Amino acid sequence: MATLLRVPEVATGSTEAVLSEWLVPENEVFDAGTALAVLETDKAAVEVEAEASAIVLRRLVGRGATVEVGAPIAVLGAAGEDVSALLAELGGSASRAAEPAPEPAAVAPASNGSAPRIFASPLARKLLKEAGIGLEEVTGTGPNGRIVRKDVEVAIARAGTPAPGVPEPAPVVPDPAPARREPEAGTSYTEIPHTRIRRAIASRLTMSKQTVPHFTVRRTARIDALLALRKQLNEVSPARISVNDLIIRAVAVAHTDVPDANVIWTDDALRKYDSVDVGVAIASEKGLVTPVLRGVEKLSPSGVSAQVKAFVAQAGEGKLKQRDLEGGSIAVSNLGMYGVDDFTAIINPPHAAILAVGAGKPGPAVVDGELTVATQLSLVLSVDHRAIDGALAAQWMAALVEALERPLRLVA
């Protein structure tokens, strides 16, 4: 029986995405788990995978189309299956083209002589109200002619009306080129339009700072033993292990020792996790993403290294899957490779903490009452005070430093 392939919730808080690519042509058999299409979200390009084997009988939207969460984008079924009735229910036809085309008007015939009903998403209605534009002045291009955000942006641009709090239309691919401006008061500059990912980063981190009560805990760890262990591991490891890989592994040890810190805050309860899933901040050419390593407490350092390298490659290609960006209670952000001494990172919701890692540098240290020179690593933990109290955060940082300074537990 034919079924509809609908847009999944591709990112927390997102209401729509751009269908950037179809990966399976019409009338071709595919297996469960096959990537059917790529949706461009505010965070990354996400592949939509098939839940079962079938055939793409009909594409309902084309490349470059903006689609809302839950909207149908294709009809799946068996070879030769008649889908005309299903298409009729959607307001389409059996000959609908795969590429974007004008949709039927989003007007429902009224039987009592009243004005026809115009369909629009809640976000579109809100933005139109703020801009002072009526629904009847906008042509919808969403499913069955529904008015969606991009239609509102077109209407606002046409009317020359600024929309309070509404981001400018985000470019799809490729990103727009920087625009040179004429000098103002003797100053020249170049404007680089915001990408979808950059807008998302700005919105998400602003929300985090405004709504999450941050506090920080700072420690310094001596990592000479860690560096010696790394050297030995790299002599036999199939994958080259970085200091950051060992820090991620040490985070898992700290979470295991202090399980009460392996939590996140939700509106209804404090959610405590059984496994240690750690987000890793990756600055790719497409923007900042934080994919999550699963079950780090069970991984070897080489296993951590291999997974991080895979995420870096996927992030650069825009091939991270949605599940890669979900979950976890803590993230690691490392700027040590750029020579940064220390910094404070902003928590990536819904995580309860983020560890900011600086550069390891030689410096004076007192060891067993004696002054010596040691390689010292600056660590700053930003914490959501709703989920983790100060004493618990301090206990967790002590466990982390212990794991870094006595690193054999990282390979145990």
Image (cartoon, rainbow, N blue to C red):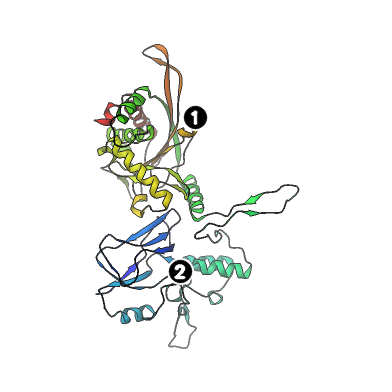
Q: Tag count in the figure?
A: 2
The disc, 2 or 1, on the residue closer to the chain's N-terminal end is 2
Q: Indicate whether 233 appears above or below 10.
A: above
The residue under label 1 is 341
Left or right relative to 376: residue 237: left
The residue under label 2 is 121
Q: Position of residue 215 (x, y in %)?
A: 45, 36
Q: Indicate whether 100 appears above or below 8.
A: below
Specify the farthest residue to the right. Answer: 185
Q: CA distance from mark 2 to mark 1?
A: 47 Å
Left or right relative to 19: residue 165: right
Dot 1: element: loop
The quadrant of the picture occupied by the N terminus is bottom left
The disc labelled 2 sits on which kind of residue?
A: Ser
Q: Nearer the viewer, mark 2 or mark 1?
A: 1
Q: Position of residue 340 (x, y in %)?
A: 50, 32
Q: Position of residue 75 (x, y in %)?
A: 32, 72
The disc labelled 1 sits on which kind of residue?
A: Asp
Dot 2: element: loop
